[in-house]
Amino acid sequence: MTSLASRLAARGEESDSKSTATEQPATRRARRAAEELAQLPAKTPADADRLETPTGQGDGHDALVRVKERVAEALYSHIGTRLNDPKLSEEQLQAIVRDELNSIVEAEQAPLTGEERQRLINEVRDDVLGLGPLQRLMDDPSVTEIMVNGPDNVYVERGGKLTRAAVRFTSEEQLRRVIERIVTRIGRRIDESSPMVDARLEDGSRVNAVIPPLAFSGSTLTIRRFSTDPFKVPDLIRFGTLTVQMAHLLQACVEGKLNIIVSGGTGTGKTTLLNVLSSFIPPQERIITIEDAVELQLQQEHLVRLESRPRNTEGKGEVTIRDLVRNSLRMRPDRIVVGEVRGGETLDMLQAMNTGHDGSLSTVHANSPRDAVARLETLVLMAGMELPLRAIREQIASAVDVIVQLTRLRDGSRRVTAVTEVVGMEGQIVTLQDVFVFDFAAGQDANGRFLGSPIATGVRPKFTERLHDLGVSLPPGMFDVPRTL
């Protein structure tokens, strides 16, 4: 089969025999591509590595890349501001782009095979409407996180392991277009005066972007993906995150309106577990969720979702998580679910838990249940109130009933390593007792995966009496220590 380079060169020679004054624009573009091919030096591995697709495809691939760039440029000029027109639905925009693309590719008159033509259309459509070279990664369900460190370095996380992806952006400009497309869809902006932004995709995936001058090596983009079909209890049990006994206990705690804090480090699955816990809330209750960027995927109908808002270019209009927590108390909530406490809103949430809003749920960054209590103390101090430490600890001991600790282990798995009851105060100390702890003594298999699972400590928590009074039953023997073989 004749290569694309040869066919373009042949078309260029044929065009040379005609008068340049009567050339059509598409013919001139094809002739220019052929001339460029003729002047190209021999390819080196370094040149090949700059392509956004795997190397070794020859000059024909270079020509296809140039055709793609011209088609994309023509499409941008034809569509213009309609790309960001809020009056157009996604389906209408897709139809406009599809029609324009077909017309532009026809006008190019480039001798493409059917496979090359379809590939060209798909890649340009991804560049214009999707996430460019990242779109194929977004379509891969095994990818849980995408990290772009400049246009040439793209990494992905699969199964808790980081690997370098075989895709790259053609330029810093292409990467910037993708970032701007993401943030403009939700009414945010990113430029030199505001070079950092948190955003989200339509599927709920969390996005963070940093551009120069803050990002010295090129624009940086981090996408933490969330499944369009949220994980449920059987999924977490299959993954080894939970055990059946622990799932029964957590369901009873939610139904019994205990206040629960999910604690863990970055990327341990706190939001996923919060989704699962929220699924246990009875459907007749009114739920209000409060988040920086909407990520929770609750399935109940009686649901109000609130999202904070950053300040505008004039430094005004900011609505914080704390503002939303305060306002939610006037919305007659049965449950308040705060995506994450990270500031002064912690004080308002603890006060809500202590004034009749039982069954509240939230997450906090901490590496152990004891650290979670210390972190809550620090966050309350950020509210700017001059409270004595003992008063803060009494608030925490009275408000929080259960702390669920998540840990990302060395094998990449995410496990619940402790379910801890907040018992009360002893002197100046908040008293905790573990109900379930992870069994690290079980060791690891040949692949380095931990064989252990969370096991009962034999301690029967005090909140079981409250659950019994509310008619919430627990399976017998749930808190018995497992027999050793």
Image: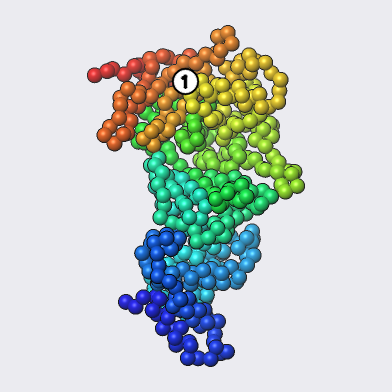
Identified at 43% across, 23% down, the residue is 418
Q: Kindly identify the residue that appears in the image at 62 percent across and 65 percent down.
A: 82
Residue 47 visible in the snapshot: yes
Tally of numbered tags: 1
Q: Position of residue 47 (x, y in %)?
A: 43, 63
Closer to us: 111 or 229: 111
In percent of width and height, residue 353 lies at 61, 23
Indicate whether 107 appears above or below 386. Answer: below
| Residue in the foreground of this view, choosing between 55 and 232 | 55
Figure quadrant of residue 162: top left
Q: Looking at the picture, how far across and down is residue 43, in whole percent?
A: 40, 67
Task: Provide the residue designation for mark 1.
Answer: 420
What residue appears at the point 48 percent right and 14 percent down from the top-left corner? 462
Label 1 SS: strand
Left or right, 338 with reference to 34 = right
Residue nearer the viewer, 150 or 247: 150
Please report the residue visible at 38 percent of the width from the left and 69 percent of the height from the top. Answer: 58
Q: Is residue 134 above or below residue 269?
A: below
* Amino acid type shown at disc 1: Thr
